[in-house]
Image: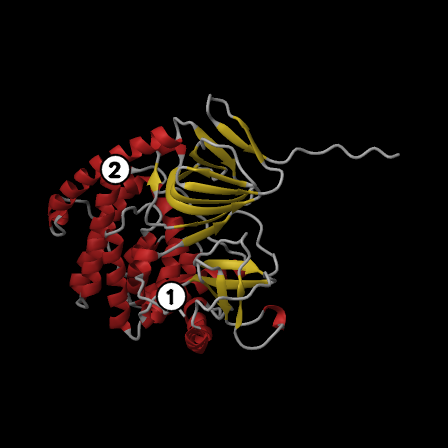
Amino acid sequence: MKHLRRVRLAGAAVAAMVLSGSASAEPEVKPAPEVLEVGTLTSTFAEFQRTCAAQGQRLWGHSLCAPLLVVHPGTRVFVASTWPKGAGTGPWVGVLPSDLTIANTALTWAGTTWVQLQAPLPDAPVRRRALIAHEAFHRLRTTLGQPGREKDNAHLDGIEGRTLLQLEWRALAAALRTTTPSVRARAVEDALVFRRERRALFAGAAVAEGLLEENEGLAEYTGVALAGADAGGRRALALENLDDGARRKSFVRAFAYASGPAYGLLLDEAGPRAQGWRARALAGADLGALLQDALRLGTPESSPEREARYDGAALRETERERARIAQARAEALRKKLVEGPVLHLPLVRMRIQFNPGELVPLAEHGTVYPGARIVDAWGSLTTTSDVLLSSDWKKATVNAPSTEPRDGRWEGEGWVLELAPGWHAKAGARPGDLVLQAPEARAPTPLP
């Protein structure tokens, strides 16, 4: 059997989003290869069960307890903490249907809303607990009818956006490392100045960032808050998230994994004026504004001295060099996925599996996902290279294939498309482009 190996959550997170509908297919009846340790996972399920009710009530006023489903990505074998609809006792072992994505997410399938987790789980117990609690928060919001909303944060891929975000993180880290009120207040004030300066530079940034912090930021805060044994342990986890966040290739969709726990823990320790902050955050209140109010901080201006405290000059130089390399990569992706020739795939009821730390914005054209799996009405697309999703999430684009589909399977450079029956491609608006088309409606058979 394959043993669980060490995986850092912040470096190997996989996310999934559902635009409409929910998966309801029944499980495939197949022999299950022995690729997951049922006994180990059963112990993990029991450990979460011992804390999910009380801790969920403490944080959010609702239990975080949920059925858990761990899936091996290579074989699609799963081990679940319970059987759907009470059909059996003990752990449920089977094979996940091929039309479902495998990811860390909330999944509605077989009449149950699961916390789905991709194997292997993190080897470190504290990170394993944090991952499960993070996804249990998403599942809770789904069952409450409050699914997360997101907007594009492409501004976090440019020099100023990235620099000011990292300066904010460095100040938050300084605040978490001290328990001296005056020192913490100054560091928090620094963080809020960088935050305000960044959001003033980019129209809509406050709204877009706030939505991701409400969704992924509060989920990751939940994981850290439940996983840490004490205040010191929780701060150590948040500091690790900040450190890991700065090493990501892209901050566009991943930044809230670092920001959320930092602001959440600082609010937890901010005193009486912070009481009730979680409910206000779920209602849309900005985490920075909540912390500013709790600590009675003013709104000072930015200054060179403030940046110098966090080595801002060296950081800007590093970001200028990164921008030069990123611009060349973005130009190559634009030629490949915008100028064509390309294959366009309509997104109707998409489910997508991807790494949130690898995204590349292409301005008004959308965002490139370097490696993803998309399931939709037309079948499934698996990419090991690049796929472009439009900003409105209505179209996916890959480089055009040089061959025709064969037996429902179509291959291009870095992608494989498994087509649903009846779907086909027609010529696009430009020479060489293709557009995937739904099966044509058939005329009714005339009566005899």
What residue does disc 1 label? 121
- Location of residue 438 in the rendering, given as x and y in whole percent from the top left corner: 60, 36
Point out the residue furthest to the right here: 448
**Amino acid on which disc 2 is placed:** Ala
Position of residue 77 in the picture relative to residue 357 (left or right): right
Give the quadrant of the N terminus. bottom left
SS at mark 1? Answer: loop
Query: Disc 1 marks which amino acid?
Result: Leu
- Counting every numbered tag in the picture gives 2
Q: Which quadrant of the structure image shows residue 333?
A: top left
**Structural distance between the alpha carbons of marks 2 and 1:** 32 Å
Q: Residue at x 52, y 58 (%)?
A: 107
Which numbered dot is residue 326? 2
- Sequence-earlier tag: 2 or 1: 1
Left or right placement of residue 111 versus residue 146 in this view: right
Left or right for 122, reference 425: left
- Label 2, secondary structure: give it: helix
